[in-house]
Amino acid sequence: MDEMSNTYRFLPHIPEPKRTNEWIHEIKQLVNLHNQDNISRTMAYQKFFLLHPEIKWSFLASMVSRNAGWNMTDLKGDIFTRLLHPATRDDLFMTYERANWSIFQDAFPQLLLYHYSTSYKKKMFHLFKEFHISSFMEEEWNRYWVERDDHRLVHSLIINEQNLIQGPVIEHEVFKKRVFGSTLFFIEDHLHFSSVLFPTLEGELLGASVHGFRKIENRILLGNKLFAILFHPDHHSSFLNFSLQVEHTGSRRDYEQFCKGILQTSTPMLHEVYDDVPHHWKTHTDWSINKKMNKDWYKEQGLPHGIELTKWFFNKQRQLEKVANVKDGLKKIWKKDRKKKRPTP
C-alpha cells in the first residue's frame, strides 16, 4: 500500500470562503467523511500525520486507534465468543466505538482548522467554539501557534481527550453499569489485559498497559508513556514503517503475520463483522471550565521499563484461551448432569 502517494490528496484544497458558516460546513463535511468507523478514523489520523509530522499526537492517535480496532474484532474472535455472552460483547464494542467516535469528533476539527490555518497563514482557532471544542484546547492551539512546543501540544491533546470521554463514556450510566462495573472488567483491569501494542515488521510488540482504567490520571499517564515509546529515536522509525506498509483491517493478523512461533488468533477483519454505527451528541459541555489542571499531566516521560510485550502479551492470550476452554468443559459437564437429572417420561 503506497500511503505517501495518497497523502496529498487526503485533504482537499478549499478556496478561502468569505463567510464563517461556509468554513463550518466544509469542516463538518470532512469530519463526517472520516468518522465512519475505526478503519476510516485510523487512516485519517495517519494521513494527517504524514501531511503534518509536527503534530505528533496524530500519529499517536492512529496507533492507539489500531489497537481499538483489534480489541473490537477480538469480541468476534474464537476466544471471546466462548467467554462472553453476545449482549456483553455488544456492550464492550459500543464502549470502544463510542469513545473512539467521540475523540475523533472533537479532535479532527482541531486538526483540520490547524491545516487550513497553515494553508492561509492565519489562525482559525476562534472557530473551535462552533465545534464545541473546549476553551482549554483553543488556548493551547493559540499557544502552539506562537511557541511551537510540539510536546506540550501532545500532552494537551491527551489531557483533552481523556477528560472529554470521562462523562459521556466512562461515567455514562449504561457503560458504567454494564461494562466498567462488571466482574469481567475488574478481572481484565487487574490482570492488565488492557494493553496498547505498537507492532514492528520484525515481529516485536512494544507498548504499555493501563491499570485503573476509569481514573483520568491513569489514562493520561498511559498516553504520555505511549507518546514517549512511539517517538523514542530507537523505535520510532520501526513503528512508522509498520504503519506505512501494513493496511489497518482491524484483525490482529495485521501484526501476527510477522510474529514467529506464536499461535495466531482468529480475529476477523472489522468490515467483515461490524456495520457503521450512527452517533450524535446529546449535550455539549466544556469540561475545562470547572476542571483544575494537574501539573503532573504535563510531566515528560522517559522510556518506560518493560516495554517489550511480545512474550507477555501472547502468554496473556494463552491464559484467556485456557479460561475459555475451562468454561467450555464446565458447560459440557453441566449439560451432562442436567441430562441425567431429567425425569424419565
Image: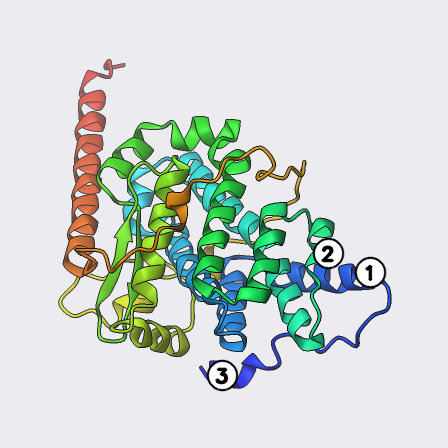
Q: Which residue bears the numbered disc 2?
A: 127
Placement of the C terminus among the 4 image quadrants: top left
Question: Which residue type carries mark 2?
Answer: Leu
Q: Please say if 333 is above or below 52.
A: above
Task: Indicate which disc residue 20 carries.
Answer: 1
User: Does residue 123 appear to the left or right of 234 in the view shown?
Assistant: right
**SS under mark 2:** helix
**Sooner in the amino-acid sequence: mark 1 or mark 3:** 3
Q: Residue at x 82, y 60 (%)?
A: 20
Q: Residues within 10 Å of mark 2 (few under 14, many from 20)?
A: some
Q: Determine the CA span between mark 1 and mark 3.
A: 32 Å
Q: Please say if 244 is above or below 65.
A: below
**SS under mark 3:** helix
Q: Nearer the viewer, residue 86 or 212?
A: 212
Q: Residues within 10 Å of mark 3 (few under 14, many from 20)?
A: few
Asked where in the image residue 200 lies, by quadrant, the reply is bottom left
Q: Are marks 3 and 2 in contact (CB under 8 Å)?
A: no
Task: Indicate which disc residue 4 carries.
Answer: 3
**Sooner in the amino-acid sequence: mark 3 or mark 2:** 3
Q: Residue at x 41, y 77 (%)?
A: 244
Q: Are marks 1 and 2 in contact (CB under 8 Å)?
A: yes
Placement of the N terminus among the 4 image quadrants: bottom left
Task: Indicate which disc residue 115 carries.
Answer: none
Q: Residue at x 46, y 58 (%)?
A: 152
In this view of the protein, can residue 311 be seen by the observer?
Answer: yes
Residue 275 on image: x %, y %:
55, 54
Question: Which residue type carries mark 3?
Answer: Met
User: Does residue 59 appear to the left or right of 254 in the view shown?
Assistant: right
Residue 171 on image: x %, y %:
49, 31
Q: Nearer the viewer, residue 307 or 125?
A: 125
Q: Residues within 10 Å of mark 1 (few under 14, many from 20)?
A: few
**Sooner in the amino-acid sequence: mark 1 or mark 2:** 1
